[in-house]
Amino acid sequence: MNIVVAIYSEFRSWCIPEAEVDRLRSEFPEHTFNRADTDEETLAAIGPADVAFSSRITAAHLAAAPRLRWIHSPAAGVGAMLFPEMIASPVIMTNSRGNSSVTIAEHVIAVTLALLRDLPLAWRRQTECVWAQNEFDAGVSIRTLRSARVLVIGLGSIGAETAKLASAFGAEVVGLRRRPAGKPVAGVNAVFGPDALARELSRADVVVVAAPQTKETWHLLGDREFAAMKEDAILVNVSRGKLVDESALVRALETGRLRGAALDVFEHEPPDPANPLWGRDDVLITPHVSGFHAGYWPEATRLFAENLRRFVTGQPLTNLVDKRAGY
């Protein structure tokens, strides 16, 4: 089989190391692996491809790939590849769901504790060599995660792992997902459907966005939802930037209604320097790194290799994506 490996980005961390491509060539000498590092190289290589190991296949790529039967994404999110032609095509799609669940969940807990304890203030004062003891618990009260009510929007592998860690800290965790009657999730006290969003936002001290990006979740949180949120609540987004209306978030923060926000993802990455979220003391920005961990690429390659064996032998693939649902 002919396999195109097209995993590239302007950001180095999201580019597959050559060692992982070599590993695949060594494990599967009977197949041809062609690496592509730009959209143009992908277009040139995809014509004879039966399989694509990629997180970026465009409509032009699909149109140029009459033999393509399966795409495996090294990431969990595949929303950018679910354009109408892809959804209508017979091409099977799988993802690497679960690879970054633990590290993203730990990131959620880290930034939540940082905001609850006002640690960004300590960092700012440290750079100024200022002993700011009198500033703590003055304007913004120090809070604990224990006994806080945490709303996790999206109970996939990331949301489920986040719920488990938050509950271990003593938080009361509730979840929202499309099918509330599905499999129980450890650490989650109650699960509700999307129609309960406004009610649960009004009760939550911490809101974690971990849902996939779909047509239904675009700007899931906007002016109306932020107005419904509990005063002094924290927003944490580790999903995709387009789930949050950033302009509405700025307005909510400017009113002082929210305690703060921790954002690992943005509607447009990197955010424009003029984006007002950059300069806010109540916003903790990380550059889409919550999913990074030392074993990311070896694990992503392992997941693909396991599915490749299944694909060749006609076995069911793992982490199959429902293209119409979006995840």
Image (cartoon, rainbow, N blue to C red):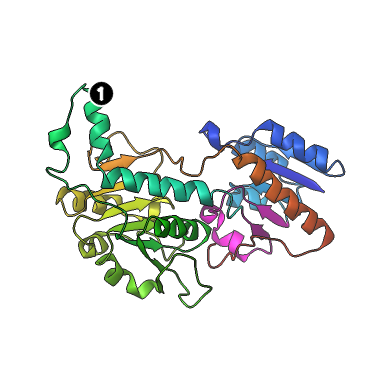
Quadrant in the rendering for residue 280: top left
- Location of mark 1 (residue): 127
At which x and y percent is residue 276? 24, 40
**x then y, percent, for residue 101:** 52, 52
Residue 8, by quadrant, is top right
* Residue 12 in the figure: left or right of residue 91: left
Magenta run includes residue 5? no
In the image, the segment drawn in magenta is: 69-95
* Residue found farthest to the bottom: 181
> Residue 290: image x %, image y %?
46, 43
Task: State whether residue 292 appears in this view.
Answer: yes
- 247 sits to left or right of 303: left
User: Considering only vertical position in the picture, is 224 above or below 119?
Assistant: below
Give the crowd class for mark 1: few <14, some 14-19, many >=20 residues within 10 Å: few
Q: Is residue 287 left or right of residue 22?
A: left
Name the amino acid, label 1: Thr
Is the residue 246 above or below the residue 319 in the image? above
Q: Is residue 84 magenta?
A: yes
Q: Quadrant of the C terminus?
A: bottom right
Secondary structure of the residue carrying tag 1 is helix
